Structures are given as structure tokens and as C-alpha cells.
Image (spheres, coloured by chain):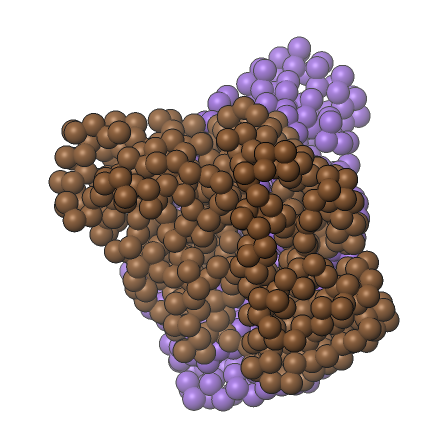
Chain colours: A brown, B purple
Amino acid sequence: MLSNIVKEKIISIVTKDNFEDTKIERLSYSYDSTPNLQSMPDAIVSPRNTKEVSEVVKVCNEFKVPVVPRGSGTNLCGGTCPTEGGIVLLFKHMDKILEIDEENLTITVQPGVVTLKIANAVEEKGLFYPPDPSSMKISTIGGNINENSGGLRGLKYGVTRDYVIALEVVLPNGDILKTGGKLAKDVAGYDLTRLMVGSEGTLGIITEATLKLIPKPETKKTMLALYQDLEAAAKSVSKIIANKIIPITLEFLDQPTLKVVEDYAQIGLPTDAKAVLLIEQDGSFEAVNRDLEKIMEVCKQEGAVSVQVAQSEKEAEKLTTARRSALSALARLKPTTILEDATVPRSKIAKMVNAINEIAEKYKLDICTFGHAGDGNLHPTCPTDSRNHEEMERVEMAFAEIFEKAVEFEGTITGEHGVGVMKAPYLELKLGKEGIAVMTAIKQALDPNNIMNPGKVFAKDSKKRVVVSK
Amino acid sequence: MLSNIVKEKIISIVTKDNFEDTKIERLSYSYDSTPNLQSMPDAIVSPRNTKEVSEVVKVCNEFKVPVVPRGSGTNLCGGTCPTEGGIVLLFKHMDKILEIDEENLTITVQPGVVTLKIANAVEEKGLFYPPDPSSMKISTIGGNINENSGGLRGLKYGVTRDYVIALEVVLPNGDILKTGGKLAKDVAGYDLTRLMVGSEGTLGIITEATLKLIPKPETKKTMLALYQDLEAAAKSVSKIIANKIIPITLEFLDQPTLKVVEDYAQIGLPTDAKAVLLIEQDGSFEAVNRDLEKIMEVCKQEGAVSVQVAQSEKEAEKLTTARRSALSALARLKPTTILEDATVPRSKIAKMVNAINEIAEKYKLDICTFGHAGDGNLHPTCPTDSRNHEEMERVEMAFAEIFEKAVEFEGTITGEHGVGVMKAPYLELKLGKEGIAVMTAIKQALDPNNIMNPGKVFAKDSKKRVVVSK
């Protein structure tokens, strides 16, 4: 509960209209897209500009009130769940595209802009903002930056981090920090821009961002390769890249995922295949055609039973839309869906998929696997039921083993979803105690009162998934 | 001076052969490529592996001895000058390429490997490591990472930071931190990899790095556009990019630079032109040809008096080699050469070049300007004589104004050379007191004894260039 003095101070900054603390409002913001995780905030505050954010944060810092920034709450790691109460900072008013600069190829936005709106706005000008998290129709750029979101095009084009070139950030003490600029090169001091990207709201509140754009590629083509052997599909992935081709998209779906997606999307996907690769390439017409021919050759060499190029943009669109719906499709199966994003070097994908299947069998669970095979970013997904405590314990043990395997294969516990609450207990697996110590030192130096999204990234004690221990 | 106990401890770690403290050795490492900056180290230590680095750092931390890591000392900001004494850590033994991984497209190296050796080693395998600082024949990758070096290809391919995906770092307390991995996606915790890149040795000692590679482009072409009007050249730069073409290289040389370079390289450069653009594009044959045609059209529209494509690889090589020799050529003119790297958004290049010329005139100095126009990274260069104190004062005032102008145009005080000693007094201009405060907090949190390259990045007091105040 906020004290009356805090409440009054915040209202005096943002006005009554932008302060909510009714039970129903608090309930609405007590969870995000993470299964089985809920915690009530004390209030929801919707600032209208950076100055208001700064003033609200100053009050919170003085009275040690947690601040949880929130876009659309699409994240899957509990990153925007107010686990320690405090205020949820909502960016519904700060949702403007401020500028598209065609000379410097940049777009400057407020944090509340929906990602797809950015993609569409720049496309109209012949430009391209590559990061495309599956949730881009709903997610906001502020959330994308805080989580360093990936997407289907990460293989060729990188992730959100690779496009953020300047930030305005309200620091825990309320100071307003400006980093970077419309600059291709800037080595003036530590890379604070990229320190903020992916810090999950634990170091400051992003209030404005300038993103790098690139020219829209001339053309794009999509193809589907079918396999009766999972390993052959995985091997094709490394083989394509070892042939010096970097496709824009190189997605993998195993048979269980394929069946569920087809059932959901009904577009005639080949559900008798054991695995499929969805491959896209963009660039100049000639280069795309040459790459596609080479890819086709590699896939066939590696044992693909069929390789087909989408004959129209509509057909291609259908395929990628189906892939993007994988989580929604899987979520229809059972009440609870645990989707993870263990990531390995792409040369280890075959091994990792096999390991996931063995772990699923060991714990008697259904785990479907799909994901961004080209960048080794897999999404093992378990449809389950959180009311079944016995099964949930097996789920927990299975995912713990999956994370351990990923790290054993020189991978990571999270490729694009973030640490949040859910993976905090596993972070040390990846970073070692040295990495945790460095992060802790930085966090304490910048946010000594621990008001910025507390309870996230840094584990409190156990190595258990919160989803189970609750 | 090192105490006997420190000396003995370090020798017991690295052996006598790898410890030097004779006057002649200390003198050899008392300066780097920065003009007019010299300071004696207490000893030069050459560790043979990470464990030795860690043990040496532990001793230094216990006894509060400064540690200055050094590759080839090619930097221009005083980054490797031991301004506060202590030990220079030399990586002559840690100079191996450890692995080229063709499946994951990575190379893993020790810090002492010369940059060109990396470029050549991967090219043999059909791969490409894009960052190409002008000093790449001599500079080491450890230095490149510490300074986040740029180069001629930054416009299209980015800088060193964009290729570092994993690091092994010895922290100030001697702990060994491992960040990242052979991973296209990794959001497990703060981006410590990129915090280390460009931190100029002030946060830790890099002992191993994994770099991302890309497939070698099919072809590359080079052209030269001549102008009788400096502004027309600058405008061509923004216009090319506004036409959705991102060349690999887009270099600018003004007439004074051109004359000096021709005098040095003797390859028949058109010294009667007021400015030239050196333009390179790579990619598929068809795309490169199309881009070149379009670029030619734009340059002519903007008033180029001549545009010529190099007819052979040899001719192209000559042109880029001439460009790379600009600093060496200018350095022949006078005893002291002050080369800076003020950087602006590319839309502001014409304004910035004009401003530099006005400032040169105001202070009655010769300032030649060349640089990476495509990314707004200019190198205003003043041939001068440090023994002429009156002139040096004018040089100092001129460059202070140049930095102020760059920041006024939303640029930065350094695009690729780093802050070091030379630009520390100007850093606040760019970052504000908030940025300096965040950096200071991080530095103190990780290196409380301030042993890591002390006196760099963080200004002590004045706003003067050290080159003058000494």
C-alpha cells in the first residue's frame, strides 16, 4: 500500500486521471503473459512525458517504492509482474513516433509505440526495422528494448540491441540520462546504451529511443523443407550457413508443433513430416534466387523429402503467420503453457533437440520444440496444467535439465525472452558467480534503494522455478 | 617504483624472462602513438596465459599498483600511456588464433593477435571480419576491443563492438569473467560483453575474445568522385544514403589532405579537385553494379566534375591504400600531428566541414579534413609543432571549438579513437553530468582501488587538452 503522502505527491505530478488504485485496476496489472505468476501492484501511474516520469521516480526513490515499467505485458519471464508491489508505470500516453529521419536513417519513438506500428511506418518510406518478435502486433518498443527482444529475422539482422543507437533514460534517482545519438560511430565513454538494452527495467526507465533503420531489401522469398528425420533438418541448418549463406529466417518446427499449428491455422501444412524448416531470404533478385537454389541443394543433400518455394507473397505470408502463431496454437492444448527459449550455438542444434526429447521422455511430458534454428534459439514448449502439482514438479525438473544442457552445449538459458523472475534462479548457471557479482555491483551502484523493477533478474535464493514453488 | 615484494611476487608468477624494469625498457613503453604524451611505467610484464594475468592483477589490486594493458600502442588518445606509472601488461605471448569455427562462423583469439592476421586467416576460408581500423596492419585485436575501433567499412558493417560476441576478462579483483558465447541471441543478464568493449581497459583485462564472422561478399568495386565544391561532396554523401544505398566505404578527403596524400603515395590522385569521395560497394555482382550506377548518377546530380570506377583490383587497392596512408602522409608535414575524430550525424557533414574550416581560419591554423564521411566520422588533422607554445594554444582552442560544434550538431567528441587521456576533459560535453555520474558509479563498483588503467576516460579537473597543459 502506498502511503497517503506518496499517493498525493504522485497525483500532484500526473493528475488524478492518470493515477489508479482501485482493486479492479490493480488486478488488471497484477500479471503479464507469464503463466502462473501474479502479484498486486499498489497503483498504476500513466505519465505523459519524461519530466513526469522523472518526478514520479524521484518520489519513489525517496519513499523506496518499487517502480515496474510496463508496455503491453507480452513478456514470458515475469518481467512486468509487480512481484514486490509498488507502482506499475504505464506508457499509454507516451506512444508517439516522434520522427523518421530519412537522411540519417533513424526513427525516434516514445516507449509506448507498438512494434508493428514502427515496422509499418518505416516501410512506407522504403525503410526497414528488422527486429520482429512474435508478439510485435501487441508488444511495445519500450518492452522490446528492456527485454532486448529477438524474433524470426535475428539470424541475418540481429536483435533489438543492434538497432538502438540512442536512449533517454530516467535513472533511479530521477536524473535524465541521454546516451548515444544518430551516430554510426560513437566511443565517448562506456556503452551505456547497450547496458540499458536488455536490463529489464532494473537500471532505469526508458522514455525515448532512436533506432537505426536500413533500406528495405529489394525482394524476399520463402520456402519450406520437409524432413522425415529430425536430425537431418537440424543438420541442414548448420550446413546452409557453412555454405556461406545467411538466410533472413531459418525456423524449425517439430512434428508435434506442426500438427498443433496446422490444427489452429488450417493452411495445409504437411503434418506427416517429422520436422520442417521454414526458410526466408531477402536481398537483390539475383542473389535471392541463387541463395534459394543453393539452399534447396543443401536441404536435399541432407535428406529433405521435399523442398518447395512459396509461389506467391500470399502463400509466403500464410507460412510465416502460421509459424508466428505457434505459441497461440500450443496454448490451446492445456490450461498452462510453459514456453522456454534455451539457446545453443547453431552447430549444436541437433544435439539439443535430441536432448530435449530425451528429457521429455524421462519426465513423461509432452514437449514440443520449435524456434529460430538458424540462430540456435529453440522454444521447447510444454503444455501442462498448473493445478496438477505432481506434473508441475516434473515440468520444473525437466526445464532445469534443459537449461543445464543448453549451458553444457555452450549455450544460454535465454536467447530472447529475458530473465525476469522465471529464469533468475538459473542465471548463475550461465554467468558464474563472477558474472552475478559484476551485475550485482552495477545494480547496487545505480539503484542503491532497489526501486527499479525489484525481484527481477537477480535471484533471491532458490534454484526453483517460481511457477512451481508458488 | 614497485616495491621489492610486488616485484618478487610478479616475477614468481611470470618468471624473470617476462618481467622488465630496466630504464630502456620502461622508456620504450612510456608512450603510444599519441603526440606529446609520455609517462614512465614501473615495469613491463608479459603474461603467458589467463591464469598469470589473473594472478598478476590480484597482486596489483592488493598493493594498489596501476595496470595498463597494451597491444601495439597504435591508439591516438593516450589510452596505453602509463600516466600514473604501474605495470604495462604486454600481450606478446598471448597472440594466438585459437579457433576458426566454420559452422558457427566465429573466430576465437587471444588479445595479442594483430588485426590483419585475423582478416587474412578468415578470408582464406571464404569468411570476412569487417572492422578495418587504419592501423590494422599493426594494431592488436585486444586494443581494437578496448577502444571499440572503427574503420573504413563502418558505414555498412559497423564497428568492432558489433562483432564481439564473447569475452574472457580478468576483473580488477583477479576473478575471471566469461561473457556471451557463440550465440546470435543471448539475453541472460546485463550486456557485460558490450560494457567491456570500448571501456579502454578501465574495467578489466581482456584475455580472450570470440568474434562473429560473415560470409565474404561475392565482389567489391571502388570508385572516385571529384568535386570542385566541398559542400557538393558532403551533400552527395547524405544523398547516396537517402537513396537507400549503404556503400561499404564512403570516404571524404579535402584538397589539402589530397595534396599531401598524393605527394606521399604518388599514384596520380587529382590534386586540383577541391574534394574527393572514395566509394566502395560490395555484394552480389548485379547489386554492386546497380548500386554503382545509382551512386554515379547521384554524385553527378550533386555536382561531381568526374566519377570514375577503378578498372582493376590493383587500381582499387592503390586508392584505398592511399586513403589509409593519410595520417602517415600528414605526419610528414610538421613535427607534431594532432588528429581528431569528431563525429556528427551524416546529414550534418557539410555543416561540420564548413565549421572546421571557419575555426581553422579563426585560429590561423592549417587543418586538413578527411575521414569516414558516410558515418559522419571526420578526422580534422592539424600539422603543428608542440615546441611552439603559442601555436599549440591556438590548436587547443580550435579543437575545443571543434568538439563543441560536433556536440552542438548532435554528434560526439570521438567516433572511433576513444577518450583516453586526450578527450577525458571533453567527455562531459557529450554525456552530461548524468552520464559521467553513471560511468563513475560503475567504475567505482567494479574497480574500487582504481588500478585499471587509471587516469583514462575520467577527467581529473581541467577542460584543457593534456598535450598543451604539459
* Residue A273 on image: x %, y %: 76, 67
Q: Residue at x 78, y 21 (%)?
A: B16
Q: Residue at x 73, y 79 (%)?
A: A308
* Residue A199 on image: x %, y %: 47, 42
* Residue A135 on image: x %, y %: 48, 59
* Residue A462 on image: x %, y %: 57, 25
Q: From this viewpoint, which residue is outermost toward the front? A: A388
Q: Residue at x 47, y 84 (%)?
A: B299
> Compared to B18, does A23 lie above or below?
below
Residue B44 occupies quadrant? top right
Numbered circles on residues, count: 0
- Which residue occupies the foreground of this view, A467 or B275? A467
Residue B387 occupies quadrant? top left
> Compared to B392, does B233 lie above or below?
below
> Compared to B392, does A445 lie above or below?
above
- Which residue occupies the foreground of this view, B143 or A420? A420
Position of residue B227 in the picture relative to residue A330 (left or right): left
- Which residue occupies the foreground of this view, A453 or A39? A39
Position of residue B97 in the picture relative to residue B352 (left or right): right
Quadrant in which the N terminus of chain A appears: top left
Q: Is residue A42 visible?
A: yes
Q: From this viewpoint, which residue is outermost toward the top? A: B5
Q: Residue at x 74, y 72 (%)?
A: A225
Q: Is residue B397 visible?
A: no
Residue B179 occupies quadrant? top right
> Compared to B68, does B229 lie above or below?
below
